[in-house]
Amino acid sequence: MSLGQLLGLSFVQHAFYAVTAVALAAGAVGYFVVLRRQAFAAHAIGHVGFAGAAGAVLLGLSPIVGLLVFCLGAGLLIGFGGATLDDRDAVVGVTLTAALGLGVLFISLYSGYADATYSILFGQILGVTWVDVGLVTSLSMAVLLAVSLAYRPLMFVSVDAQSASARGVSTRAMSLLFMSLLAVTTVVAIQVVGVLLVFSLLVAPAAAAEALTNRPLRAMGLATVLALFSAWFGLFLGVWLGGPVSFWITALASLAYLLARLSSVQAARRSQRAVA
Amino acid sequence: MTNGAVALGARTVWRDATFELEARTITAVLGPNGAGKSTLLNAALGLVPLSEGSIEVLGAPPRRGNRRVGFMAQSRQADAMSAITGRDYVNLGFDGPRFGWGRDRSKREVVERALSLSGTTAFAAQPLKSLSGGQRQRIALAHATVFEPELLLLDEPLAGLDLAAQAEIVDLINLIRDTTGAAVIVVAHDLNPLAPIVDKVLWIARRQVRSGSVDDVVNEEVLSELYGHPIEIVVTPRGRRVIVGLEEEFAHPHPHGHDHSHEAGHEHFAEIYEEETK
């Protein structure tokens, strides 16, 4: 089959629309994950999602229902308990462990769904249906809309929580809002790259963007472009050369981060030389 | 504030605080660590309710988000970030609390005015992380004064700065007061760097608050009574005050008491020594 024919297949097109929507949301939310130093929370929410998906399958429901319930629950718990930086890590850690324990229990109760487990852990973007695409797209668009509306207060609490609070922005409310957005984004990203590789879309592009520019809006746009680039070319390479799509996406996103760091180190050297 | 008190849980931070601040004056808030200096600012910001007494800010009860009150926080996450420039941070002082897509036309002009008043225009495009401590404090002052507030609350604006940078910030606070006519409250560790511009002192110790002119409060009688043990004040030929006997102020609740007491004790001497060897 030629490449053109491959890309024309309907499951490839489903995948294309899904990764596009997910990359848009992940780029924008990922910027705040990196800015707020909440990569650990993003990691935890993904793993909590695993327990939710396993539970949903056990009950005969669609995994995405379990993902949404568990990820949102964990997000709100972390957002509420860890609004201040001091106790955040502990709250995240305990939430993570408790959920993973549940996940182990659910798997032991249900025998013979290795496939489902595999696709939750590593993603199975080439298996998404039109219904999945519709769900993923609307969730991603809702996240983008919320981020664009709450952009300034989110920035404010992230860069100066005390002043923001004095100016009437509730730190706790913003923390809850952000964690719910992160939870929904994690759920849609899991559809593409799976629980274990969620960072490839949520953290790597944003971290690369942060290394390249110090203007928030530009960084957010760049993070989105890098996430889109990794997702599109990852899908393309997976279809063309074979191998898991999530591998390709992860490889490209990590490469983008590596190149960004190298170029920012070079830029710093150059400007030092200019000063000297 | 009239007979104001603040309690956090069962602990009274301070009580019987009565004072009034006038426009165009600078008030220094002094006292040991943990005495409740920042709590005083939080009460004025409406973040902490009084447990007794009453407080009025610009003729009304304090409320969060009042644009007529400017606030500079002591520690700001932004200072460690390479992801945000000084101008971005000042921009957030303008419309950071606002949700939605709208843009205010006057934003650029207002922000540039605040930057130019604080003398930060030249480095406003650099990330905060790459700036010096003094430059960051200037940016933070621009952030706090973006709306030319009538009451300006500054939490430890001189902390962690060398003497030259302290003097620059003191000059800038004075300039802001003169230009905007604000009543300024400055929380500080040491009166000396602020002494040239201070009109009034609030000294908080052992849950009590004393207020008045520098001479009314910073004298051996008042401070000895406030601390409950003899305090001596030595005035140097240049008019700087070395306060002896404060070391014991740290002896109780604070966990790092003794370390701080040595630092604080030496600070005064070190500072005068440096000044006179120049």
Image (cartoon, grey):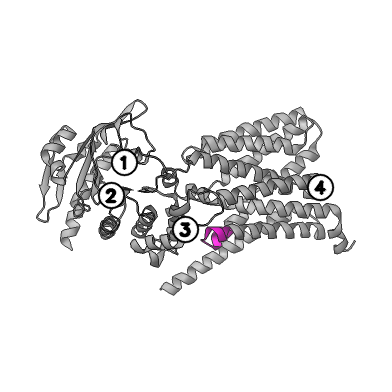
Q: Nearer the viewer, residue A48 or B177?
A: B177
Figure check: A198 above or below B136: above
Please tell me which residue is depicted at 80% across the width and 44% down the height of the picture: A131
> Closer to the camera: disc 2 or disc 3?
2
Estimate the spatial distance between the alpha carbons at disc 4 and disc 2, rounded to whole Å: 62 Å
Coordinates of residue A174 in the picture (x, y in percent):
53, 42
Estimate the spatial distance between the alpha carbons at disc 2 and disc 3, rounded to whole Å: 25 Å
Please report whichever mark, 3 or 1, sits nearer to the chain's N-terminal start: 1
Q: Tags 4 and 1 in contact by the CB under 8 Å rule?
A: no
Is A216 colored magenta in this rendering? yes
- The chain under label 1 reads B
Figure check: B237 above or below A2: above
> Closer to the camera: disc 4 or disc 1?
1
Query: How dense is the environment of label 2, judged by Cα within 10 Å: few (below 14), some, or many (20 and up)?
Result: many
Please tell me which residue is depicted at 26% across the width and 38% down the height of the picture: B258
Q: Which residues are magenta?
A: A208-219
The kind of secondary structure element at disc 4 is helix
Please tell me which residue is depicted at 67% across the width and 30% down the height of the picture: A102
Q: Are marks 2 and 1 on the same chain?
A: yes
Residue pointed to by mark 3: B88
Residue pointed to by mark 1: B59
Estimate the spatial distance between the alpha carbons at disc 2 and disc 1, rounded to whole Å: 16 Å
- The chain under label 2 reads B
Estimate the spatial distance between the alpha carbons at disc 3 and disc 4, rounded to whole Å: 42 Å
Estimate the spatial distance between the alpha carbons at disc 4 and disc 1, rounded to whole Å: 61 Å
Q: Amino acid at mark 2?
A: Val
Asked if residue B2 can be seen in this view, the reply is yes
Left or right, A46 with respect to A56, comes to: left
Residue pointed to by mark 2: B184
